[in-house]
Every structure is written in structure tokens, then in C-alpha cells.
Amino acid sequence: MKIGIVWEHGVSKWTMAPFEELLDKHDVTVFVGEKNKFSTEGVRIPQQALTRRGELRAALADPAFALAHLRAPYKRFYFYLNSLRAAIDDSFDVMICGDGSRSLNTLATLKPSRRYKLVVSYSENIPVRSIFDAKTDLIKKHAWSAIDLLTPWCEHIRLGMEDEGVTPPIQTIPMGICQDIFQPREKDHALCAQYGLDPDKFIFSYIGKLVSWKGVQYLLYAAKVLKRQGRTNFQIAITGRGAQLDNLKKIIADLGLQEEVVFTGFLPYTEVGRLHNLADCLVLPSVPTLTWQEQFGMVLVEAMACRKPILGSRSGAIPEVSAGASLLHTPGDWRELATDMARLLDDPALCAQLGETGYRRVCERYTKQHTARQYEAALLRLLAAG
């Protein structure tokens, strides 16, 4: 089976890890754009570069086709359309893309002149969310009929798709992680010292984007509640980057949390496992917005693979993904979050129980090998059906 992957600008070690497991038996290629957002270091799948210069050459090779699609209703309506048209021939059995609108639109546009099946790894969990974005809505209406299989990352997403009335075939296939990167390890005292963390204190961690809808501010408010209660046996490690970094620092200063909170900066994927193992618990306090809810939460699975308990909000897929491994709070309710933080501070046995349940859950359903097996079976069935 020959498989092509177009993951917009999101090609990375973690997105490609499950597909690497198919290399022993299948021919897999990933197409990587010039402005890819992540490092592709360590990705074992053969990569084919997509460049602006190559796109121009491909357009000049067939100017009639290029001109016809240049008159698109929106700017950036396609993702290296001419380059992919030249690179994808009839030898490809399957093309897989994330639900990024441009890559899906491009593969749907090219499909009538090729023989591949189109599979879309899907993360959107709000029904008809595309109505809030006219370009995405138009692409969806154009591309949806070309899809042969949708693979939502979890049941929460699948149910949202059913509520919308999605017609293409659907099979839930979660994203899987690398257990060689994420596994239980002892706290690294030298790394704690590097970040100003006390290994003898209970360390809550947040790892992810520093944006308002991830709710990191509520973790800080909860920390203030604990401090006001006289608790001094905890710290918070915040890892990531984003638009709210400066505001979070102002909150910390105004609440007097300089001793309790440290920022580790942004770390590459291969190093994040070390951060998880510095912590005693992961906190994901996401809050829903009009157009977004937590879609899966890979950071949940990473922490669970390191046997860490979870404190999560009831946003989107968090309750499903962290089931049995988490204490859940109402999104935005920092006092309820503070109560859950206090429970873990006072109950090591509960921490261990939640951590062990999460670890078993990862081993059963969220490894890259498990995801790869599900993809292989689904794709073979799709091809056999003709």
C-alpha cells in the first residue's frame, strides 16, 4: 500500500509517530511545506519538500491549470496545489490529511484525476463550526463529498460529527504517542534546580499554548487560593509560549506568586517527557469558547504515560481522554480547581491511583503502535471495498 500524507504546516514527530509504524510493510511519504511550524527532526517517514519555487515551476509546467485555480474565491485557498498535482501520481493508494482546510481542499480538487482514497484525520468537535469562517465553510462544502473516510481522534469528536449529520464513513482512531519519549521516570533533581523547582514540593505542571482559552490564568487564581489557605508545599511549572505570556506574568506579580510559579520556556517535543516527570500532576484548565473546545489534549496522554494524575476541566474531550485518571472541575471555576489541587496535595494514595489508571489507559489505547494498527486495518478495508 502506498500512502501519502499532507498535514498542512503541522508535520512533526508527534503527528507522524503512528504513521512511522507503517513503514515496515507499506510505502509512506509525507509532504512538508516550506513554512512548516515544527521541526521534522527525528521523523523517519521519507519527506518530500514543498517550496514556493517548486510551486512556481509546477505552475509554469501547466499554466492553464494553474491559471484556472489562481482565480480562487479566497487567498490561500489551496496548499501547494500545483506541486502536489505533479508529485501525486496514480501509484498512491491513499492520501491522508489533517482537517486543515487548504490541504483537504487541495486533495479533494486533485482526487477526480487520481485513483487514491481520501482519508481525513479529524479534530473538530463543534457541529457546523465552519459557519463562523466563510472560507472554511466553502472549502468544506466543496471537499466533503470527496472524503472516503473520516477518522476523528476520539468519541467526543465523532458524536459531534454525528450531531452535525456528517455523511462520509467515520471511524474513531485516536492519536498515539511515543512511549520511548513518554514513560515514568524519577524526578531529575538537576533539571529541577535548572528551573528553580524544589523537588521536595508537590509540582503542578501546565504544558501547552499560553492562550486565553487554555485557561492557564485560572490555575494561577487557584494557586492564590491555596496560598491564602497557608499552603506552602507546592509549586507550578508552566511550559509553552503564546500571546498571553506577558499577561500571565502580570497576574503572577499582582497575586504575589513569584515563589510558587516558574516558566520553563518552550521545549522541543523530544524533551517534553522530562518535564512531565518533574511534575507530580498535570493541570489542563481549558475553557470552551464560541468556536473551540478541547479537541483531544495530547498533553493529557503524555502525562498519563508518565503515570501522572490529571486535573482537567470539563471542556470538550478532556473527560473522555483522561477518564479514570483525573479529577474534573467546571471550566473557569478556579475555586473548584483549588479544591482538587488540595485533595492531591493531601492524598498521595489518590495521586498514585489516578496515575496508575491513566498509565494503563495509555498502554491499552493511546500508543503509536495501537493507532498504527487501527489505521492499517481501516485503510486495507477501504481499499478492499473498491
Image: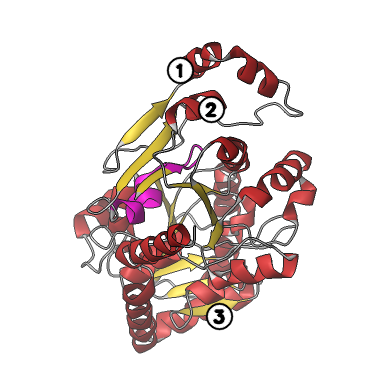
Residue 325 in the image, given as x and y percentages of width and height: 43, 79
Mark 2 / mark 1, whichever is N-terminal: 1
Q: What is the three-letter code of the residue carrying label 3?
A: Thr
Residue 315 in the image, given as x and y percentages of width and height: 62, 68
Residues at circles 2 and 1 in contact by the CB criterion of under 8 Å: yes
Closer to us: mark 3 or mark 2?
2
Eyeballing the image, is 60 above or below 118? above
Residue 27 in the image, given as x and y percentages of width and height: 30, 45
- For the point 25% across and 66% down, the residue is 183
Circle 2 packing at 10 Å, graded few (<14), some (14-19), many (20+), is many
Magenta stretch? Answer: 5-20
Eyeballing the image, is 35 above or below 160? above
Q: How many marks can you see? A: 3
Q: For this view, does 298 lie left or right of residue 27?
A: right
Residue bearing the label numbered 3: 339
Residue bearing the label numbered 2: 80
Task: Tell me how far mark 2 sits from mark 1, CA to CA.
Answer: 9 Å
Pick whichever, 325 or 81, lies toward us. Answer: 81
